[in-house]
Image: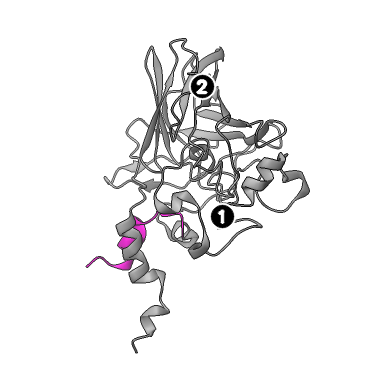
Amino acid sequence: MEGVTAMRKRVLALTVVLAVLIISPLARPQTAPPKSGAANNQEATPANPADVDDWGHPITPVSTSQNAAPAPRHDISGIWDPGMDPIRVLGVLGASAMPEDGKPEHQLPYTPLGRETLNRTKPTSGGRSVLPADTNDPVVYCDPQGMPREDLYELRTTQILQTPQSVYMLYQFGKIWRVVWTDGRDLPKDPEPRWFGYSVGKWTDDYTFVIQTAGIDERTWVDRAGRPHSGELVVEERFHRVDHDHLELTVTINDPKMYTKPWIARDRLRFQLQKSDFDVREMLCSPTDLAEYNKLVGDPVSNKGGK
């Protein structure tokens, strides 16, 4: 029978219990983020100490050097790591640029329908949080996160591959991949909804790649705080290659049914380029692992009932 430590590693991706994320072996200690002349609202990545992957290979620590080589033109490919900050990266309070923290400046511009739909969601974080047993978060039941939540919650190491016709995004959380078409096609009109929608992208300058995604399944949440969206949602992802070693991501939400104006959900989240042999671990939602976790460590009170 597996020990508790091994089980904790396996259920890292189960978002119903925040403690699993905290005790995970992936939650490495952090150092202060590097200082730079960037704007104050830039989401900076803390540096990780040296470690080894599951193959026993050393993991290169995040460099704090500001002397990286220039960015290559029209290239965001590589393995990118955003760090492990629970609020600014993992999104435990919702979209990091507009977290569900009770501050007036983080109140979203809901339409009446948006407010009504919001009140039907029951998240496990933020000011409207409920107990895990009472949540209706679809991710808890192993539904796909969908877009834009894949960018806004549990965003971990991400691998980007480029071909002449498309860009492929491979995400650690959920072991998900999606295709962004770059062959000049338009977004489809009235498409069948998909969890991750339909995505097209183009270069707006030598170092900025912009993705538009639409046709997203309405069953998904925008973020962990239960922010809603409609079938009219269009998500814009703006990837900017700062230099050879750093990439920034800005995510904008535009859904006129739910919000009176577009709003920024991520504001220049910074990624660090990893070596090409960097090992990306699995983070999968497994109902059987969740049941086993609850039996071993998830409900210690119930284990005392038979005494």
Q: Quadrant of residue 112?
A: top right
Q: Is residue 279 magenta?
A: no
Which residue: 54% across, 65% down?
131
Q: Nearer the viewer, mark 2 or mark 1?
A: 1
Identify which residue, 39 or 260, lies in the foreground: 260
The range drawn in magenta is: 1-16
For image coordinates 58% across by 38% down, the residue present is 229
| Image: 120 above or below 75 | below
Assess disc 1: are there few (<14), some (14-19) or many (≥20) residues with their C-alpha within 10 Å of its C-alpha.
Answer: many
Secondary element type, mark 2:
loop
What mark, if any, has residue 123 been given in the picture? 1
Label 2 CA crowd tier, 10 Å (few <14, some 14–19, many 20+)? few
- Determine the image quadrant of residue 303: bottom left
> Residue 68 at what x, y percent from top left?
53, 26
Q: Is residue 41 left or right of residue 146?
A: right
Q: State the SS at label 1.
A: loop
Which of pointers 2 and 1 lies earlier in the amino acid sequence?
2
Q: Is residue 9 magenta?
A: yes
Q: Is residue 87 left or right of residue 19?
A: right
Q: How many marks?
A: 2
Per the rendering, the mark at residue 110 is none
Looking at the picture, which amino acid does disc 1 mark?
A: Pro
Residue drawn at x 46%, y 12% is 185
- Locate residue 161 relative to residue 251 in the image: left or right: left
- Which residue is labeled 2 in the image? 69
Q: Amino acid at mark 2?
A: Ala
Viewport quadrant of the N terminus: bottom left
Q: Nearer the viewer, residue 195 or 252?
A: 195
Q: Nearer the viewer, residue 28 or 5?
A: 5
**Can you name the residue that lies furthest to the left here?**
1
